[in-house]
Image (cartoon, rainbow, N blue to C red):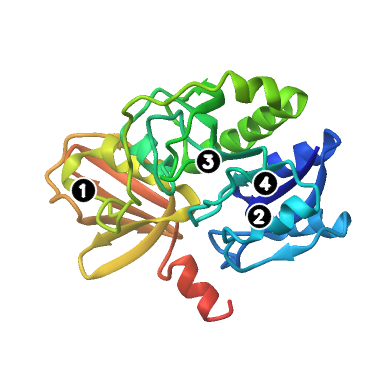
Amino acid sequence: MRFAYAGIDMLGTAFDTLVAAGWTPVKLFTRPCDGIVDFNDRVVATAARFRTPIQLSRLMPQDFEGLAREGVECLVVAGYPWLVTGWKGVLPYALNIHPSPLPEGRGPYPLMRALLEDRRSWGVTAHVLAPAFDTGAIIAQENFDLDVNETHDSLLTRCQLAAGTLARRLSQDLPQAWENATPQGEGSYWPRTTDAERTLDWSKGVEHVLRTVRAFGSLETIARFGDSQVFVQAASGWRQAHDHAPGALVLAYQRHLTIAASDGYVTLTGWSTMSRQQTRAMGR
């Protein structure tokens, strides 16, 4: 099948899987990435290998006429920030691969909130592109249980693997899966997480603090203690009675900082005084 792909590396396993399954990439729609959180190196390299044209500007309704003239049958969207409309009546198929078990977790990037809410299962969904984000009929879904110590980074990896599995299934019989697509229920929309949500709250105890660290992983949480602020990627901790005020720096040893939580201690084992964005801006 001749197809176009709109997305970045986040779920780029879908792009690679469709190409490996024999689908022909006709055009890649992607966007500039910061090289810190967002990347498109992988999808660009795949496109280059097949001499597939690349468009960095937003995919607009008028682009579909050109895709149709090129014989494109399907547009696959994954990790693309802009709403895509105007395909109906021009292309036979257009679908989005979203990293949540829709209809739960609609929104731009639900992975952190899934861990903040201590969800015990998760999934990735392929759905028909609709006029509103993440609301189209479900074509296929890949679900899995979450580990009690799941991190953002492990969950993202599992979503990437699931996206590849979904793409493989769809490559085998997209017309039948499309015909059997089922409308979504009411569901839920999850906005982007805020800086307040990624700031460690020492008053809520060790379990809450460590869950927050895991939920953001390499995307970093913010830890404040005394007059200091650091950006945290990894930590460990334990519950223990003590008389320190929550948020007090109890011990600094080498690169480890131990902070009092309300019911124990948390040791920051991976942290920096600058965020990844600040470090990148300074060229380090």
Would you say 251 lies left or right of 183 here? Answer: left
Quadrant containing the C terminus in the rendered view = bottom right
Pointer 1 or 3: first along the chain: 3
Quadrant containing the N terminus in the rendered view = top right
- Of tags 2 and 1, the one toward the viewer is 2
- Of tags 4 and 1, the one toward the viewer is 4
Residue type (three-letter) at the residue carrying disc 2: Phe
Q: Which residue is mark 3?
A: 129
Badges 1 and 3: C-beta atoms under 8 Å apart?
no
Q: Which residue is mark 1?
A: 202
Residue type (three-letter) at the residue carrying disc 1: Trp
Q: How many C-alpha atoms fall within 10 Å of the one at disc 1: few (<14), some, or many (≥20)?
A: many
- Of tags 1 and 3, the one toward the viewer is 3
Give residue 169's position: percent from left, percent from top.
70, 24
Badges 4 and 2: C-beta atoms under 8 Å apart?
no
Pointer 4 or 2: first along the chain: 4
Q: How many C-alpha atoms fall within 10 Å of the one at disc 2: few (<14), some, or many (≥20)?
A: many
Q: CA distance from mark 4 to mark 3?
A: 18 Å
Residue type (three-letter) at the residue carrying disc 3: Leu
Give residue 156's position: percent from left, percent from top.
54, 40
* Residue at point 53%, 43% (across, down): 153
Q: Secondary structure at mark 4?
A: loop
Label disc, if present, on residue 12 of the rendered structure: 4
Give residue 210's position: percent from left, percent from top.
34, 40
* Residue at point 88%, 54% (across, down): 50
Badges 2 and 3: C-beta atoms under 8 Å apart?
no
**Residue 235 at least partly seen:** no
Q: How many C-alpha atoms fall within 10 Å of the one at disc 4: few (<14), some, or many (≥20)?
A: many
Q: Which residue is mark 2?
A: 64
- Of tags 2 and 3, the one toward the viewer is 2
Residue type (three-letter) at the residue carrying disc 4: Gly
